[in-house]
Image (spheres, coloured by chain):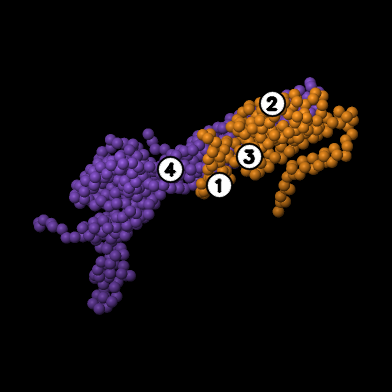
Amino acid sequence: MRPLLPRTTSSGHLGQWTPTAAHTRAVLLATGAAVAAVLGRRPDLLVLAAPLVVVAIWGRIARPRTAPHADVTLTTGTLREGDVAEAAVQVRPMSDAEGVITLAATRWVERKPVSGVARIEGGTGVIALRTTRWGRRHIGTLSITLTSDWGAYRVGPTDVPDLATATLPVPAAFDAAAPTPHPRGLVGLNRSARPGSGSEFNTIRQFHPGDRLRRIHWPVSLRTGALHVTSTYADEDAHVFLLVDAFSDLGPREGIDGRPTSLDVTVRAAGAISEHFLASNDRLTLRTVGAANIPRLGVGSGTRHLRRVLETLASIAPASERRDDGERAIRGVDPNALCLVLSPLIVPTTVGLAHTLAARGLTTVVVDTFPEHLAADPGSVYEALAWRIRLLAREAQVHSLVTRGVPVVPWQGPGSLDHVLRDIARRAAAPRLGRRR
Amino acid sequence: MSAASPRSGRGPDAPTWRTLRFGRGPRWSLPQVALALAGAASAGAFLLSLQAAAGGLDPIWWSLVLVPLVTLTYAGSGVPLAFWGLLLVGWFLHTPAGSFSPWSVPAALALVAGHAAAALSATTPPAGGFPGPVLRTWARRTVLAALAAPAVALLAGALRGGGLEAGPAAYVIGLGGLALGVFLLRTESPVQAE
């Protein structure tokens, strides 16, 4: 099954004009009263029938004679959680058509007006919708009904083919002041261990052919009598590997306006981390476990890659591939990559994957995305007991990771990774035991 | 019965309507409920005219006033036809044969108003509403159609009297109706090209 692609335009014929109950009523009442007036010599009945005769004739004469066609356009097919899009209906060839648009209620789509009913005036109508949770979905069935003067003739209600949107997760606020470990590349903002073109001061050394003249350090050069230059560490980019756990989606789904589920936290955290590292010109790889039909996203950097990452995150259907052992997801990971595993640590498979990554010698950090409100507010005694048992098992899993040397940090937005990244950088810079050759 | 108000948010400047819910039924916008009340008022006006024309009316007939309210859901069906057909039959049976009552004019106005209310209600789902321009358009149409009733009444009265001469009162009423019709059907003056 392919992921649902955004669809922003739709069109269709609305059908033929048919007389309504109102027109039938006007005709029958007018005719009946007029006949009774003539047969019964009752001029007062003729007076009663007169307005209805006008209504019936007016409705008949003013009836539209062409079958209408409707075009529906959505202002955007890709939007963020909480964003508003507008579905505009244009009726052809009738520029003076009147009627109503009805948008059926769909989960995670708020309608404005809330009734989902908007009027078509002068051949055009607009209804707004607001998506409240990330994901790919249809916006709901859009029906169009047109009526003529006096409501005498009607077309519809006719459903037009469904429109679809991709709602990208709103990245949570995130920032990290600590450098990314193991930078190795050409561009970026991370200080590497080797000297080169950059901004971080390294040392002052003698001038070599090829050095830039603006790097000459004149005080030292005058004092020593030989040209000296300021050398810097090279600024390089790092590789970040994100592994998203989609095995479970715990908690009530309340959308952007409510409390987040575990997968909401995971996806929004993944979006935020991606945005941060890609803005720093780092390379990023995204892999998911536990979700089916997720396209495999390669290494990339920059704004367009961020867009691809967010669209991939929006495609996640939780627990749609429970047999996934994750081996494919962690295959071929760059040895110098910083591996960030985002998981609520409920399913043992993800914990096992973190163990595997660490055992391969990769720098691995587990970001705990378990929402605290889940266990803090149990609905019943039995639920509280179940959560207590589950959290005890989870503590054991976390402990096993920490024992192996894999840091487990709770997701807290900005600065969540600062402490652990600094520790990793310090560990990498520390002297190591090596075999003398 | 419960009431709900729309949530605020960005979007087109479409009016939002308060809605009412009767039991487990659909939500009804206040304009739709107002149209049902207008239908009930029209039925009441028709029955008042019938009582005046017939010189009396069985009290059971007054219970029909509630029909447009009770049959709110069926405005787009044959129920209004049956209802107003019943009222016309009532008029035929209660007024003396061969008579002509001036009360037929307000009864005709009530009839066309009731018809228009039901027809307008059927053009929109229960939760939908009617912006001002739509209401004004329908009001103009209804008034224009209703003008046929006094015109036919004047003609019928003249024919019954044996001549087409109209009294001063008829002239005043006719000219007033004509002026009202012109006022309601007026259009905006065309915009001058710069």
Q: Position of residue B125 (x, y in %)?
A: 57, 36
Q: Are marks 3 and 2 in contact (CB under 8 Å)?
A: no
Identify the residue shown where x is 24% and y is 58%: A423
> Callout 4: 10 Å neighbours few (<14), some, many (20+)?
many
Q: Are marks 2 and 1 in contact (CB under 8 Å)?
A: no
Identify the residue shown where x is 50% and y is 45%: A85
Q: Position of residue A245 (x, y in %)?
A: 30, 43
Q: Are marks 3 and 1 on the same chain?
A: yes
Chain containing mark 3: B
Q: Select label 1 or label 4 by which is in front.
A: 1
Q: Is residue A90 visible?
A: no
Lower sequence index among marks 3 and 1:
1
Instruction: Kindly report the distance in space between the C-alpha atoms of the residues bearing marks 2 and 4.
Output: 55 Å
In the displayed structure, A334 sits above or below A437; it is above
Lower sequence index among marks 2 and 1:
1
Question: Label for residue B12?
Answer: 1
Q: Select label 2 or label 1 by which is in front.
A: 2
Q: Are marks 2 and 1 on the same chain?
A: yes
Chain containing mark 1: B
Question: For this rendering, which residue is in front, B129 or A82?
Answer: B129
> Which amino acid, mark 4?
Ala
Question: Label for residue B86?
Answer: 2
Instruction: Kindly report the distance in space between the C-alpha atoms of the residues bearing marks 3 and 4.
Output: 40 Å
Instruction: Kindly report the distance in space between the C-alpha atoms of the residues bearing marks 1 and 4.
Output: 21 Å
Question: For this rendering, which residue is in front, A132 or B191?
Answer: A132
